[in-house]
Image: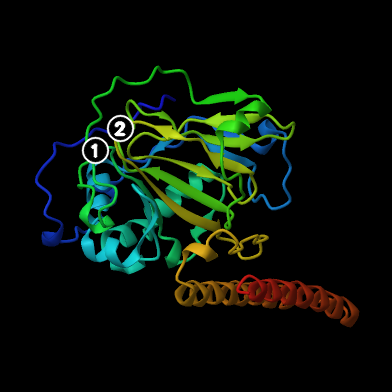
Amino acid sequence: MAISETVGVPAPHTWEPNAYEPATFEPQIHLSYRPPKEIITFDDLGLNPPTATSPVAITTPFPLLSAEGVRELRADIFRREVVGKYGSLKYPGVYRIRGYGPDAPFTYALWRSEAVRQACSEAAGTELDIIYDYEIGQLNVQLPADVDKDAPITENLPPPVPPRNISAPLEEDGALATETENSKALVSAWHNDSYPWVCVLMLSDPVGMQGGETALRTGDGSIMKVKPPGMGYAVMMQGGSINHAALPCLGEGERITFVTSFRSKDAAVRDSSSLRTVRPISNLDELYRQWASYRLDVVSQRAALKRKELDVRGRSADEIRQMMNEWVRDQVEYLENTVKEMA
């Protein structure tokens, strides 16, 4: 799939951020989901991570939002009251927005919809749930080259309609490429994500951009690159189980990506979530509240599953004691890790 593939760009219109009225999310209007044409498995990468919950390591880009969906999501997020409260500057011209949750009502309704959950789960090859509201979601914003990068971020609000890039489309050369270890000189911040799964959605028109691929470290030390999505397209990745990095993106226009984090819907599945990469960039009061609540909810679901298992008669006293001993040990370890992540 080429980097230039994208949903249709709607005609631009005048943007008045203070006059915004949130739209009602409607899947038949705002979604354009089709399953990914190709997936890359851990076997393809020569990896066998113990934290993986599906054979799928990463998908190639697939359509998720319609042009109308992209426009409404951008209009919902890029308001002064949202950017001013939840945005933080990374360095001049680049900032992030995270932790807004229901304060962006259209965005929240979209990501909490069953239609989006099912689409992301189908692409990933396993049933998923959003980790919690704080991770709906993180926007990474690279402003166009022609704006005043020293101005407050609330003075450089991207419009709802992504600006058209006048550069020529990049050559259609497929979605994947493998390079040698020498490629790592082009890559910064190799890492594993805090959460098991991420959905990375493109909210800009990437035609004419160069770079911006996701680099994956394979089992033999080589690097596989996956093309970035087109506008309205997304990729699903088990970022908690893959060492990866974003390659530099060159171009004069904006680049805005939206990252939402997921975990397995099945509470019995191993949960490898942590806070290592998100703790330094979050409001800890709210992050820790939601983190602790979700972890307790997982233990509650596991207790309900164990109780159903115990309802089956016929086990001896020794079998029940051993079963409960193993279960309690696992939950104690899980809860201890919950506290350690908040240190």
**Residue 77 sits in quarter:** bottom left
Colour pattern: rainbow
Quadrant including the N terminus: top left
Image position of 126 (left or right of 307): left
Total numbered labels placed on residues in the image = 2
Q: Is residue 5 visible?
A: yes
Residue nearest the observer in this picture, 31 or 252 = 252
Look at the numbered discs 1 and 2 and tell me whether their residues touch, using CB distance below 8 Å.
yes
Q: Is residue 139 above or below residue 58?
A: below
* Cα distance in 3D space between marks 1 and 2: 8 Å
**Residue 340 sits in quarter:** bottom right
**Residue 311 sits in quarter:** bottom right
Q: Is residue 3 above or below residue 243?
A: above
Residue nearest the observer in this picture, 200 or 248 = 248
Q: Is residue 166 above or below residue 201?
A: above
Q: Amino acid at mark 2?
A: Glu
Which element carries disc 1, helix, strand or loop? Answer: loop
Q: Amino acid at mark 1?
A: Asp
Q: Tell me the tag on residue 146.
A: 1
Q: Residue under circle 2? A: 252
Q: Position of residue 108 (x, y in %)?
A: 33, 62
Residue sitting at x 73%, y 77%:
332
Q: Is residue 42 above or below residue 327?
A: above
Residue nearest the observer in this picture, 121 or 69 = 69
Q: Is residue 312 visible?
A: no
Label 2: how many Cα within 10 Å (few below 14, some 14–19, many 20+): some
Image position of 114 (left or right of 236): left
